Amino acid sequence: MSESICPAIRRHAVLIKPPDRLTLESGLTLSPVEVTYETYGTLNSAGDNAILVCHALTGDAHAAGRYSPEDEIPGWWDDLIGPGKALDTDRYYVICSNVLGGCRGTTGPTSINPLTGQPHGADFPIVTIRDMVKLQKLLLDSLGVKRLVTVIGGSMGGMQVLEWAVTYPDFMASAIAMAVSAISTAQQIAFNDVGRRAIWLDPEWRGGHYYPGDGPTEGLSIARAVGTITYKSDHLWNERFGRRVEFAGDPFSRQGRFSIENYLAYQGEKLERRFDANSYLYLLRAMDLHNLGRGRTASGSWEEALETVSTRLLIVGINSDILYPTYQQHEMVCTLRRLKKEVEYFELDSPYGHDSFLIEFKIMNQAVAEFLDNL
C-alpha cells in the first residue's frame, strides 16, 4: 500500500445561491448549486500552481489520501497524487471536485428541489460535460486559482479535460486526456443504453422518484456489469477467470455459476451501496452527448473545434482498451498536429484494458511527471 496524504478533507462550497442561477447548455437553470471537492498541497501567491483532476463515471472528489488512519482504501488516484509523485503536492495545489449531476455531495438528482422540498429525482435537468466544466471553473475562481498547470483525467474525466482545452484554452499551461475520444461513438452509446434499460426496467425505479428507498438496485447492478465488461480486456478476463466454475450442486442446474459471473455480481453489489441510480443515468447521458464540436461550429465538427486549443496536450491511449480503442486517440493527435498544435501521444502497453489508467501507476507516474517537467 502506498504512503498516503492523511487525512483527506472533504469540503463543500455553495457556488450559486438564489436569486442567481447556473444556466446549463440546455438553456435550463439550477439554483442553488453546491460542489463537494478536496484539495492537496498549497496554492501559491500567484495562484498559478494548481492542477485540476477530473474523475471518471463512478468516481468522486476523493482522489487521494485517507479521511482517517483507519481507512483501508485511500482515494482513487492516491498513487499519482502526493509528495514526490507525478502530481507532486510539494510543488502543486491539486484539486478534485465531484461532478455536476453526481451523488457524492455536488448538486444532482439526489439534491433537494427547492420548489418541492423533495429530491429532484428524474426531474433534474440533463447536464453535459460542458456544464460540469463550467461549474469547475466557478469553483477554481472561488478558490483563487488564476491559471492551471494542467487539467488531467481519464474516460469521462478525459472528456472534461478536452472540454477544458477547448472552452478555456488560455487558462492552463497543459492538458492530459486519457482513454477518451473527441466524440462519443455509436458503440459507446450502445453500451450505455443497455445499462439504462436495465435501470428503467427495474420496478423499483418508479420513474426516477424512488427516494427515500434504495431504488433500482438490481437494475443498477446489471448496468454496472455491462460497464465492467467493457473496462477490461479479453486477455485479462481469460487470465483471471477463464472458465473456472463455482457450482452449487449439479453443474447442469440453474444454480451453476462461472467465476466471472460471481465477479460481475460482486461489482454490481459494490456500486449499489455507494452510488445513486439516477446519477448513473444522468452521467451516462452526459457521456453520450460528449461532442467537442456541438454548438461551436456550423458543421458541429470536433476537428474544427480543436482549432481553438492553445495549450500543450498529452493524449494517452491504452493498447488493450476495447471501449475507447487507440484509433480514437490517434485521430485526435493527427488532427491536432495538422492544426499545428503542441501535442504528444503516449500509449500504455497494458493488459488491463480501459481501466489501465486506474491501475498502471508506475508507468503513469513516469509519463505524467516527464510531461509536466518539460512544460
Image: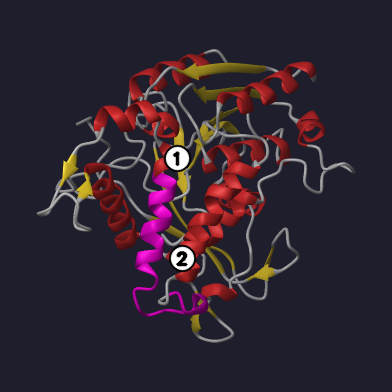
- The amino acid beneath tag 1 is Thr
Q: Main secondary structure of the magenta part?
A: helix
Q: From this viewpoint, is residue 12 visible?
A: yes
Scheme of colours in the image: secondary structure
Q: Is residue 46 above or below residue 229?
A: above
Q: Residue at x 44, y 62 (%)?
A: 103
Q: Is residue 373 left or right of residue 39?
A: right
- The amino acid beneath tag 2 is Ile
Q: Is residue 335 left or right of residue 109?
A: right
| Label 1 environment density (alpha carbons within 10 Å; few <14, some 14–19, many ≥20) | some
| Label 2 environment density (alpha carbons within 10 Å; few <14, some 14–19, many ≥20) | many
Quarter of the figure with residue 65: top left
Residue linked to disc 2: 199
Q: Residue furthest right?
A: 298
Residue linked to disc 1: 230
Q: Residue at x 9, y 54 (%)?
A: 249
Asked if the stretch drawn in magenta spans residue 225, the answer is yes
Q: Measuring from the top left, give residue 68's x and y in whole percent.
A: 20, 49
Instruction: Check the picture and name the quadrant holding the N terminus.
Output: top left
Q: Is residue 58 above or below residue 165?
A: below
Asked if the stretch drawn in magenta spans residue 207, the answer is yes
Q: Residue at x 75, y 22 (%)?
A: 335
State the residue in front, 152 or 120: 120
Q: Is residue 28 left or right of residue 95?
A: right
Q: Is residue 291 above or below residue 200?
A: above
Distance from the alpha carbon under mark 2 to that under mark 1? 18 Å
Q: Measuring from the top left, give residue 69's x and y in whole percent.
A: 16, 45
Q: Assign a secondary structure to mark 2.
A: helix
Q: Measuring from the top left, give residue 278's x and y in whole percent.
A: 48, 66
Q: Which residues are magenta?
A: 205-228
Q: Assign a secondary structure to mark 1.
A: helix
* Cβ atoms under marks 2 and 1 closer than 8 Å: no
